Amino acid sequence: MADSQQPALERRIGLGSAISLNMMNMIGVGPFITLPLVVAAMGGSQAVLGWLLGALIAICDGLVWAELGAAMPEAGGSYAFLREIYGRNGAGRMISFLYIWQLGFSAPLSVASGCIGLAQYAAWLWPSLDRPLLGSIPAVSFLAAATCVLAVAMLYRNVSSIARTAWVLTGGVLFTIGAVIVAGFTHFHAELLHPAPHAFDLHAGFFAGLGSATLLATYDYWGYYSVCFLGGEVKEPGRTIPRAILWSIVIVAALYLAMNVSVLGVIPVQELVGNSSAKLAVVSSLMQQTVGSTAARLLTLLVMWTAFSSVYSLLLAYSRAPYAAALDGNYFRAFAHVDRKHKFPSVSLLALGGVATIFCFFHLATVIAALVAIRILLQYLLQQVGIILLRIRRPEMPRPFRVWLYPLPPLAALAGFLFIVFSRKEASRELLDAVVVAITGSALYLVRAWRRREWPFAPTQSDPDQARLDHSAAEGR
């Protein structure tokens, strides 16, 4: 177990800051890069269906996060959920360890995707960044890595200072999307939104395109659960966590839909699908066509601001999970270290930031594909099944918030995640990535458990900490 003298986390995050941190995590560089890819996947303006289906999956999954986060308001998010769902001293110990192990890959992949997107937008402004700087490695990769290092440095402070910075960064995020929406709707041509003939015919190609579009949209929505990883630092978590999750989904879904429609009303579908450069600079192209090149360059800088805000929020949230596992004695002890001055998990932050810096030298498409498969198969599916098991096994557990229309949301989210994973042409490669992470993590856990005489090499015991868990849930009401 971690040293009992370690300083504790403090509950300083209110509802406004929680929503702000969630939205920073959600609105990264993703929608600015993936928007033309979503249109291309569906072949026209019917791509709006991908954003709508992605929002529906996010709401269903968000309700699951809301119930679990309100019932178990602790640092670590999914780590705490999976540990309690599957048994603190039983299989839950291995499953929660495996979750932290995969997080050591998926969290840095998510952070790196934001850093790479920021650097690629910078290359639109300064094309020389695409030139090789060291061997065949372009300067843009080093800029992405430097972005990650800067985010870690800015997070090396107490959470109150970070929350104040979050408001400033979120303001830039909202202004960026707002500028795109206003520019689009003030130069709007409704006829460009007309779908092609037979666009809604229900055949195999339609569903394959919808799957690809929804996967990209789902990736762009991810982040609505960030507040759960900061559960030990949230004020009145039983009320704050569910509200922060649901409000952030509703606000971001409305912004994404408005931005998608505004772009489609200015830039013809044929240009979005056929012009490869639009994969990166679609919003810059929109601004250039509507208000001029100077505004386009300014907006590109704001997109870079948005990407950095996402990186900042991701590192903040995910650094709490390995800390929680180490504090629980179920991960490497060093991760339980808390900075004595600023009271945040410094080793966990530095470790995730270091791995993310390495991933910044990979291609963006590779990073996103690996991230999606690993996270869905080794986290999201376990939680959808888990909330149903927890309702059956522990109906008396205090739940300040309960999933609406239960059990439909977890079942719908489960079906949605399976659909978007297996509808991809590259599913076999991505599944292999997830399997490798699962096998290595399981092997590491079993060796460690054998040496420590823990499950499954020791008899399952009654849970000595159940009273503490129920007290935490009651505190969150």
Image (cartoon, helix red, strand yellow):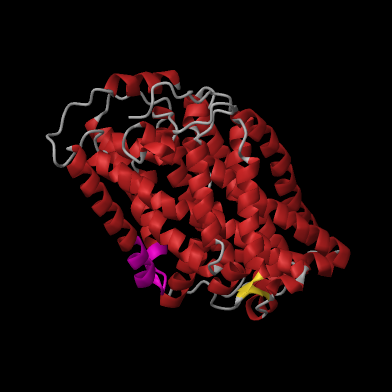
Nearer to the camera, 241 or 315: 315
**Which of the pair 451/106 is nearer the observer?**
451
Quarter of the C terminus within the rendering = top left
Residue at the left extreme, as displayed: 459
Q: Position of residue 96 (x, y in %)?
A: 32, 42
Which image quadrant is residue 287 in?
Answer: bottom right
Q: Is residue 47 above or below residue 219?
A: below
Residue 52 in view in this figure? no
- Count of numbered circles on the image: 0
Residue 32 as seen in the image, left or right of residue 38: right
In the image, taking residue 470 as reference, residue 134 lies left or right, namely right
> Percent x, y for residue 396?
28, 23
| Horizontal arrangement in the rendering, residue 425 relative to residue 121 (left or right) | left
- Predominant SS along the magenta part: helix
Comparing 335 with 267, the one in front is 335
Counting from the top left corner in percent of width and height, residue 83 is at 30, 37
Towards the viewer: 444 or 256: 444
Residue 78 magenta-drawn? no
